Amino acid sequence: MGRYVIRRLLQMIPVFIGATLLIFLMVNVMGDPIAGLCGDRQCDPATAAQLKKEFGLDKPVWQQYLTYMGNVFTGDFGTAFNGQPVTELMATAFPVTIRLTLVAIFFEIVIGITLGVVTGLRRGRPVDSGVLLLTLVVISVPTFVTGLLLQLLLGVEWGWIKPSVSSDATFGELIVPGLVLASVSLAYVTRLTRTSIAENRRSDYVRTAVAKGLPRRRVVTRHLLRNSLIPVVTFIGTDIGALMGGAIVTERIFNIHGVGFQLYQGILRQNTQTVVGFVTVLVLVFLVANLLVDLLYAVLDPRIRYA
Amino acid sequence: MRGATHAKWAACAVAAALAATACGGGGSSGGSGDGGAVLSSSWGDPQNPLEPANTNEVQGGKVLDMIFRSLKKYNPETGAAEDMLAEKIETTDSQNFTITVKDGWTFSNGEKVTSKSFVDAWNYGASLKNNQKNAYFFEYIDGYPATHPAEGGKQTADILSGLKVVDDKTFTVKLRQKFSTFPDTLGYPAYAPLPQAFFTDHAGWLKKPVGNGPYTIDSYTKGSQMALKKWDGYPGDDKAQNGGVTLKVYTDNNTAYTDLLAGNLDLVDDVPAAQLKNVKNDLGDRYLNTPAGIIQTLAFPFYDKKWNTTGSDKVRTGLSRAIDREQITETIFQKTRTPATDWTSPVLGEEGGFKEGLCGDACEYDPAAAKKLIQEGGGLPGGQVKITYNADTGSHKQWVDAVCNSINNALGNDKACVGNPVGTFADFRTQIGDRKMSGPFRAGWQMDYPLIQNFLQPLYYTNASSNDGKWSNKDFDKLVDQANAETDTAKAVQIFQQAEEVVRDNMAAIPLWYQNGSAGFSERLSNVKLNPFSVPVYNEIKVS
């Protein structure tokens, strides 16, 4: 187990370097960011040159990358164009997005798995067909439509919630955005669980458990569900990273100042430091989430062992 | 824990439904007392650090306008430059000015505003090592090249030799050339005075800027909100009529608009294009659509030989005549733009140099004449024009496509004009800076100060700061110099208009339309208006 973890951690290094390098190059080919800082007029060349020097943009790209990575390892992610250190931006943005992700994951687990179990056990019944149809609708409607519609109905028409999230972004305010963010994944979780449950219901160990005379509840939770959850856990694990990075649409609709907002603005302003910094952290989140998923396998299915 | 937060959420929802008041981070106290109530307004995250000489976009400018007062102030209705902190500005030759500062003004931290507050601030703004993006505002002052050498040069002075403090109340300014309307430029935020605290604790000042305007900054959370409150000790006569303003950063102006409809926000100063159709229904007379000092034009790359031939002025004029401005402003912009008939803006007023119809026939839609002119001028260079624009903001794609459509229809050739989108604004600016434009490109101009000079000199004078097309014309330059030297304002304006006629005769840029400022506000507010810079006049807003 320990060796496995170490091996996995070592594998992260090339992935990490490759991903950051790619992002760095991509942001850099978009042109000179300083040119966009002066509004609809030409930057005065002397000031532009001075700013370039300050942000290290006058050096060749490979040198910029090396300096940047060197600084990252000392915890210095550079400065955004508005003079704020990127770490400060991260300190305000990540907690918000993490809260939003937690709310979304919570909905995925609670609603998704519950619906999946219910439909998996009643395959072909009206409940099953109903939920299947519902998930189909959710999957096919884009997030921004669901988001704007809920915002309009709950926020403006009925006044149940505030249409936008305040700068505190408490858990309570994030319930609706979280639900919107989770909606598509939630539908997938439901379908995955359903299929998995339906398949395992006919397996030998479930029949044995039923034959032993175990109560139905115990059969479902301890035997059936535990084995059926492996694909679901894989999906939810990879989804953590996707939710954090992909929240741009939801965050924009509900005015949440999280990672998506910072990334969006970083890209618009072509702020290499912001974009690369945030993506670096997101890459790390992805990698760690994947590692955790793999480790969870062993817990769910003891037959899986890591040498 | 979860239960607790849930309850809070429910309480908020109920409160929002009942009283439509802000919840959590907001600040509205909801009292009915006129002077004490706070209003909330939409805001965008400023792009640059909030320093007077470093702020060149509307969002940061909005704040500076609230926390600073300068020597002059532009009348929110007429745009005229009126004395604010200036007791008098005297000159005999339009080149040497003696400025006297009024007594009794202080910064909100108690420090006195003296002539030194101005001189220090201007020196700071001009000095290259401070990286101030508006440094060029000081380029008219003597000694500027030493403090701000051209690229590659070495900075030899930290202060402008043209500025001298005489005493606490007086200082003198010596300009590098005659510039008769110089005093009228002094209302621009870049010329604001700065307290000593700015220089002694710069980082601290940036966290919470201190100025001398009707508002002080109560709290500032970068990227999310700024709470400004009325400064009771403000000595000016344009005191705040409300208790304060909470500026909330919105990621999307659609969300801000939704918040306004839900009663969650009091003021939106940028109605999203998608909502323009509904805005009258939604808000009625709580929707403002007033002219601002912004003009949109199509500029041309005069460094490209194809656009600098004899006869190419006919092609440009022909293109101008092929654009149906009336229809585009109506269908695409829902009348938030007005077809342009000169190269300035209606906010200048007749006296300020706006002359309706100065463009004449050249801006009138006439497909037949357009076709003829373009043929006479030798046809479109390369048989096709590509209009370059940035596609990331401002829904430029729609109007560029419409302009092209109009041109194609006029010429009876559906390949005569195509749009050429560029991914980001920065890339667009880079390509302009690198002189890579192969055809006409989008050029927007938002005035710095309401003077006809500002609409002409920076854009069309040889090698001027915003002359992106690198147009150059001796007659035009001569007239501008002459106008700047003229001490009589009315005469100066007249000569500027003659210079504008040179722009017209060569069609240096095609004027498209004047842009309006738009705003929507809640029932709590009254006396809301937009100034010529399309920024709400916050201090005059009344909250009930």
Image (cartoon, grey):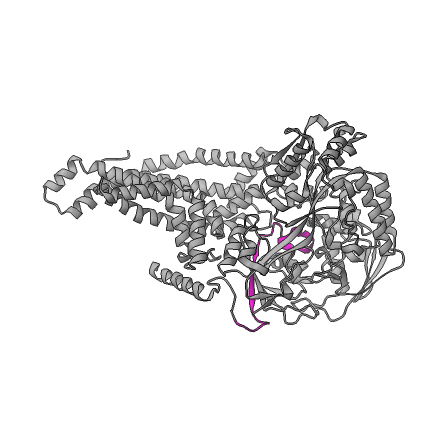
Residue farthest toward the bottom in the current orientation of the protein: B33
* Quarter residue B191 falls in: bottom right
Q: Which residue is drawn at 77% across and 53% down?
A: B451
The stretch in magenta equals B31-60
Q: Is residue B51 magenta?
A: yes
Residue B457 position in % (x across, y down): 79, 46
Which quarter of the rendered picture does the N terminus of chain B lie within? Answer: bottom left
Query: Vertically, is A195 above or below A168?
Result: above
Residue at horizontal 10%, vertical 44%?
A213
Q: In this view, does A2 lie to the left or right of A62?
A: left
Q: In this view, does B256 lie above or below B85?
A: above
* B93 lies above or below B461: below
* Left or right position of B501 against A113: right
Residue A12 can be seen in this image:
yes
Q: Quadrant of the image for the C terminus of chain B?
A: bottom right
Place of residue A68 in the rendered image (x, y in percent of width and height, measured from the top left): 55, 40
Residue B178 visible in the snapshot? no
- Name, please, the residue furthest toward the top: B382
Q: Where is residue A270 in the image (x, y as percent from the top left)?
A: 58, 41
Residue placed most toward the observer, B525 or B107: B525
Frontmost residue, B193 versus B451: B451
Q: Looking at the image, which residue sits at the far right? A: B92
Where residue B332 appears, as percent x and y from the top left, is 60, 44
